[in-house]
Amino acid sequence: MLNTLPLLVVIANMQVVQPVIIKTSDLELEFTARTPNQMSSFYEARGFPKSMLNILKKHCYITAGITNMSDQKIWLDLSRWEFSSAGKPLKREHRDYWKKRWQDMDIPLNKQSTFRWTLIPEYLDYLPGEHEGGNLVLPFTNKPITLKATFATGENKQGKEIVITTDKLFCAEDEQ
Amino acid sequence: MKSLSGFIKLTTLTVIIFINTSVIAKEIDVKPPFGIRNHDIGIAPDFTLQDIDGETFTLNKSKGQWIFLHFWASWCGPCREEMPAIQRLADKIQGDKFNIVMINTAEDEDTIFEFLAAIDVDLNSLMDADGQVTEVWKPRGLPTTFLINPKGEIKYQAIGGREWDNPVYIQFIRTLIASED
């Protein structure tokens, strides 16, 4: 079924690192680390300018796929996702940060748009059975990453919150 | 006279109930199948774009037919998977009351042309070369499909890639078309 495939960032023919999969009765989350070279190759193939690639190569990419396995609405709100590494918070930049950064660099609009489409939405209501995903862009670290992700549930977010915690995330590195 | 008046009132009431029931029945009939959500957000934002043959398309000039508005990109895996099913949908539902309009997001003409040729579909696509029409429409992700009624109102949104030639979807679209007759 097509609807079981990740939507935003299933980048064709990209090498895949073994994903971290977290399943609960309500949610399935899949995290796949991408190396800087994998991501920059993808963007380079889309004609991204070198100035943009130089910045992108310095970051950590984790593709997240989220599936709502429940029979109620589940709300993704990235402001409620807390990343940390070695006991310190790891700040994920909001998509508005990237928008301003590319605008300040006069990056062509089509490249800005493609970049945005590869990011996971900041905020999204997942219908029962829905799967959506996209990239998380974090500062690079060679230490394990912990994530605590909180999701509201129910039509008006009145349901019981779902809290997912994992310390198994990591930044993929290119072989030297 | 009194009984005639009563009869007229009763008949009128019966007709009103019948009409209302018919309307309700029609609404129930067009309940979207799994993977399509009601998305009744009003008038569709207009746009004018060129396709890969250089022809211009303006959304507002397409009123009077259901528009299947599909956002896609060549790098998006589900878009690639879904495209042949859209072709089969186009083959199955023809006529002037249904129009499939594809919008490529932020890629160039060569990329679009090569992609469509490689997956062997006979579909044209509009080119949102700078991605700004897509920004206005804000699809949930790529691919995303909107169904716009003949009045130019957005009514439904399809979530992700769909097997559009599945009988459930074909029947749903046929019901939509028939409901506007």
Image: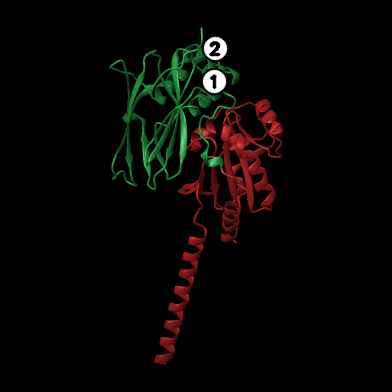
The residue singled out by tag 2 in the image is A50
Read off the chain for label 2: A
- Give the percent coordinates (x, y) of residue A34: 49, 20
A136 w.r.t. A55: above or below: below
Q: How far apart, in angstroms, are the residues tagged by discs 2 and 1?
A: 12 Å
- Give the percent coordinates (x, y) of residue A142: 39, 12
Determine if residue B46 is in view. no
Q: Residue at x 42, y 45 (%)?
A: A128
User: Residue B133 vs residue A80: left or right?
Assistant: right
Q: Mark 1: which secondary structure? A: loop
User: Residue B171 vs residue B19: left or right?
Assistant: right
Q: Which tag is nearer the camera, tag 2 or tag 1?
A: 2
A8 w.r.t. A97: above or below: below
**Chain identifier, green in the render:** A
Q: Residue furthest top?
A: A176
Read off the chain for label 1: A
Determine if residue B106 is in view. yes
- Asked if badges 2 and 1 are on one and the same chain, I answer yes
